């Protein structure tokens, strides 16, 4: 699936799905993303997200988690 197709799928409810079913699927997808972007201990500077930042240059929270946190506030 392309990036654009994935964005459309997240925005458009299937005719045969209830809004609750769509919300449940979206929430589950978001939870899996958060689980994938977990903090890993680095050193005294803090933690890193190896999924986003395998180069260890960006401390946790990674950009992905920062966006999720911002939108949930």
Image: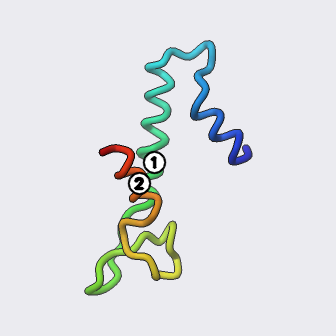
Look at the numbered disc 1 and give the secondary structure of its residue: helix
Which residue does the image show at 45% across and 44% down from the upper left?
30
Which residue does the image show at 29% across and 84% down from the upper left?
45
Residue 34: percent from left, percent from top? 41, 53
Task: Tell me whether circle 2 and circle 1 mark residues in contact (CB < 8 Å).
Answer: yes
Point out which mark residue 35 bears: 2
The tally of labels here is 2
Which residue does the image show at 48% across and 18% down from the upper left?
19
Q: Label 2: few (<14), some or many (≥20) within 10 Å?
A: few
Q: Quadrant of residue 6?
A: top right
Q: Which residue is mark 1?
A: 32
Tell me the quarter of the image containing the N terminus: top right
Against 16, residue 22 (above or below) is below
Look at the numbered disc 2 and give the secondary structure of its residue: helix
Direction from residue 26 to residue 69 in the image, left or right: left
Q: CA distance from mark 2 to mark 1?
A: 5 Å
Residue 39: percent from left, percent from top? 36, 67
Residue 61: percent from left, percent from top? 36, 66
Which residue does the image show at 43% across and 69% down from the upper left?
49
């Amino acid at each position: 699936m392309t990036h654009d197709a994935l964005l459309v799928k997240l925005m458009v409810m299937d005719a045969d799905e209830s809004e609750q079913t769509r919300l449940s699927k979206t929430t589950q997808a978001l939870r899996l993303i958060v689980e994938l972007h977990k903090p890993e201990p680095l050193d005294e500077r803090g933690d890193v997200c190896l999924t986003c930042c395998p180069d260890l240059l960006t401390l946790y929270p990674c950009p992905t988690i920062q966006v999720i946190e911002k939108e949930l506030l």
